Amino acid sequence: MPDPKPPPETNAVSSTEHKLALLQAVFDEIPDVIVLKDARGDFLLCNQTVARLYGTTPDAMVGKHDDDFGVPKEAADGFRDNVLGIMARGQTEVVFEDSLDAVTNEWRHYKSIKRPFKDPHGNNQILVIAHDITDVVKAQQKVAASERRLRDVMAATQEGIWDWHVATGRVSHNDQWYRLLGFSEGEIADNVEAFSAHVHPQDRQMVWERIQRLLTGTESNYHSEHRMVQKDGTVIWVQDRGRVAERDAQGQAMRVVGAYANITERRQHQVELEQALSTAQEATQAKSNFLATMSHELRTPLNGILGMAQMLQMPQVDEEARRDYARTIVTSGQSLLRLLNDILDLSKVEAGRLELDHSVFDLKQLVADTTLAFEDLARSKGLTLETRFCHLRSSHYLGDPMRLRQMVSNYLGNAIKFTPQGKVVLEVGEVSPDGKTSQLEFSVSDSGIGIAVEKQALLFKPFIQADSSTTREFGGTGLGLSIVARLAELMHGQVGLESSVGIGSRFWFRVATEPQANFQKPVGTPVKPVGSGALAGRILVAEDNPVNRLVAKALLESQGLQADFVEDGRAAVDAATGGVAYDLILMDIQMPVMDGQQATRCIREWETQHGAKRSAIVALTAGAFEDDKQRCAEAGMDDFLAKPIELPSLIAQLSRWLAS
């Protein structure tokens, strides 16, 4: 027989008991804290979760207060005050609070829902359901700490950081991004259009193309060095880098992040380095060209000297031919000497060792003497050579006449060389007169081949000619104009030119000077030419080179003079202190055993010790710098005769020291 059905009352009781048991199970096992407190804040009911938190059982907590379970009194009082406040307000409230875990001794964070109500007797009670959010809080704290560190890094970095949300077009920046462009935050719209607007217009397409390659995946990283425009219009160079931070399921770029740095200074250094390298390469090439030109220019007069010297040795040459050959040798030697002097002048200027003379000179006489040397050359080419003066306040000026003559000669020589027909005009005048001082301008105009504009700036640099073909056609070293430029600079002036191809050129230079309006030329006894019979005296020549000894002997004999010769400084001292009183000693500087300067010191010391007559000592040297002359003077020498020895210079020295 089937079991009889239980009465309805029994089923209801069973169902109620089951529900209560189920609720108790949920109440005990739910991970949230559930407590019921009275108006004093004492526990009336609690679940296993809060009991475990306090290290006890639910039954043991009934009638107790939080501080009975190790909660600090200050925290426990805070719980009670909070409960009483909510009861008084009579509304459910959500509260975030902390509680100490008695088992782990760790503070836990809770989100508590507190609901006040009254029991059947009207007593105030409060139900508290608290959810443990400790892990969430810790995660949030980690995120906040990371964000804080990131903000600190972004604030400290010198790079402008950007974050582009591709779909919306919104671009976020750090403060440095704004500062690098001279803006404050908020002054620029946070969209890609505003971002792009500050890329230099000439670079914008290039930057966008590179970003497109990044978006499409053609390139994994974006890198660009381009210009950006700051708020005030200043253009800066930046190094910009970026990558795709997020892509959607279809591989489309959703977010791109990047950073840029100001590299303007680095780019400037790079440009300067490239310019320096280019300049160095140009200088190296120019010097190579110069050496090739110098080789030609040196060999040309040497060929004339050696060739004519060989012709002189041939027995069948008549007397007239011998004289022609000799003149060619002299002319070639003078050309070679001028070339060497140009090189020496340039090296003096470059080394800062060229000293200018400051003397009063007759300007028109200087110009006349200079142009006279070019009249035959101009005439041989069918050219007219004209001279013009304008705006001169005086006939005499203070300056260095020798260097001015050299500068004008350089301009005139070039003008005649490069002018096939027509005329060459030298104009001299004052510009910008100001009281005592003024500037003299010398200009040389011609109707020659002219110079292209792009080549004009190179002309005043050493070793440079307007065109290498110019050297092949007309000759020259490219030193002359650079010497003029540096001499003008030393004279507080400048150089310049105007030129048109096929029409002609005008070269000019200006130098600072002082007009001497009240200058009176001193009246003195004219110096008569010295004949061979007017020179007399004992001469000693100290020279180690046999060819130079032969030249000195021949030149002296041409003036009716005899000399004793020695080959080193020690021998010169022995001869000068050996009993012969020499009126003049021609002393080479660089000699074996003892150099000329040391020999001079020894001779001067001997003269002082013995009260002997002081011999005139003149240096013979290839050294042409001012400090060479200074060292000779300090050694006790009386004068200076530069090699190669030219007869007029030698006669001048002989006349000074040996004239009757």
Image (cartoon, helix red, strand yellow):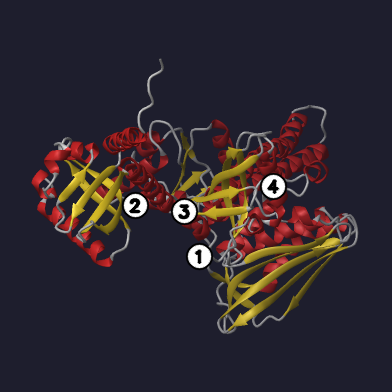
Q: Which of marks 2 and 4 is nearer the N terminus?
A: 4
Name the amino acid type tagged 2: Lys
Q: On the picture, is 641 further left or further right than 382?
A: left
Q: On the picture, is 69 further left or further right than 294?
A: left
Q: How many angstroms separate mark 2 from mark 4 (CA)? A: 93 Å
* Residue 68, image x, y percentages: 9, 46
Q: Earlier in the sequence, mark 4 or mark 1?
A: 1
Secondary structure type for disc 4: helix
Residue for badge 3 = 639
Q: How many angstroms separate mark 3 from mark 4 (CA)? A: 77 Å
Name the amino acid type tagged 1: Ser
Residue for badge 1 = 184
Task: Between residue 158 and residue 572, name the one nearer to us.
Answer: 158
Q: Disc 2 vs disc 1: Cβ atoms closer than 8 Å?
A: no
Residue for badge 4 = 208
Q: Disc 3 vs disc 2: Cβ atoms closer than 8 Å?
A: no
Q: On the picture, is 46 further left or further right than 269?
A: left
